[in-house]
Image: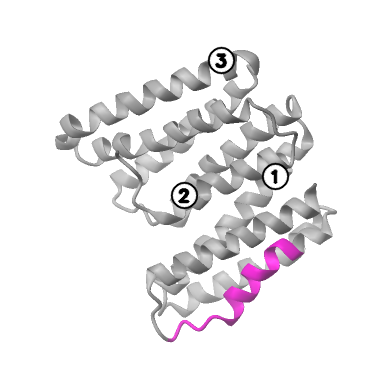
Amino acid sequence: MMLPKEHGTWLMFFLPYLLGVFLSEPNWLHVPLLIGWFFIFLASTPFLNIFRNSKSKKTMQPWLLGYGLIAIIFLTPIVWLYPALLFVGIFFLPLLTVNMYYIKRKNERNLLNNLSGILTFSLGGVAAFMIGNGGWSNEVFLIFLWVILYFMGSSFYVKSMIRERKNKKFKKMSHVYHSFLLFIPLLLAVPWMSLAYLPGILKDWFTSRATPVKPIILGMVELGNGVLFFAISRVILA
């Protein structure tokens, strides 16, 4: 089975989706939506591998077609029942194009490419909330925003711990971004959401960059922080 290698992408896939489910009204349609969305997620790996290296087409194409077919089978009835989900798909295509652009430039670690990936994964949460809520609402955009803000903070932190560990300017950028996370919920009249960001803020402010940290340790820390964010957000936004 062809699976994405980046562990962080799994958290980015499941957290927005589960938040969208549990902040709306969970129902049985969330199951086929999850399966269909999951296979779109899986299909992205062979698709982008083919784009990176056309020589891999023979190996990757069967995976791409198989994953794509399963996604279509599960998502078609959902879109039939909720045509507004087509708008979610419209946003998906330009975000995929951004990813392809940075692959072409051999600059996949760029923060803007990270943001594009975060926006893409957050669409799963939007779709899940729409199904549970019965359609669009202002809350859809807020959930979308909360998740994006959280994962951008995670991107800043991880980069400042690995690739930019010796870059003091980038470390300050990470601190400034996390400081804004305290105040944005106040501006949006949801002050208690600052608590959901607080563990990540403290982690960023007080973690030393002096010595390298193994990626597996960072991954476990980010997983724990993601679980905390989900739990606190669910309580505050419910």
Q: Distance between the residues labelled 1 and 3?
A: 25 Å
- Density class for disc 2 (Cα within 10 Å; few <14, some 14-19, many ≥20) is some
Image position, residue 89 (x, y; %): 53, 26
The residue that label 1 is drawn on is 143
Q: Is mark 3 on a helix, strand or loop?
A: helix
State the residue at coordinates (43%, 37%).
Answer: 41
Residue 173 location, quadrant: bottom right
Image position, residue 21 (x, y; %): 67, 38
Residue 79 location, quadrant: top right
Image position, residue 171 (x, y; %): 51, 75
The residue that label 2 is drawn on is 10
Residue 191 location, quadrant: bottom right
- Inspect the magenta stretch and tell me whether residue 217 lies in it: no
Which is nearer the eye, 23 or 126? 23
- Amino acid at dot 3: Pro
State the residue at coordinates (45%, 69%).
Answer: 218
- Amino acid at dot 1: Ile
Earlier residue among tags 2 and 1: 2
Q: What element carries label 1?
A: helix
Q: Distance between the residues labelled 2 and 1?
A: 19 Å
- Amino acid at dot 2: Trp
Q: What element carries label 2?
A: helix
- Inspect the magenta stretch and tell me whether residue 197 lies in it: yes
Magenta segment boundaries in residue numbering: 195-210
Earlier residue among tags 2 and 3: 2
Q: Nearer the viewer, mark 1 or mark 3?
A: 3
The residue that label 3 is drawn on is 77
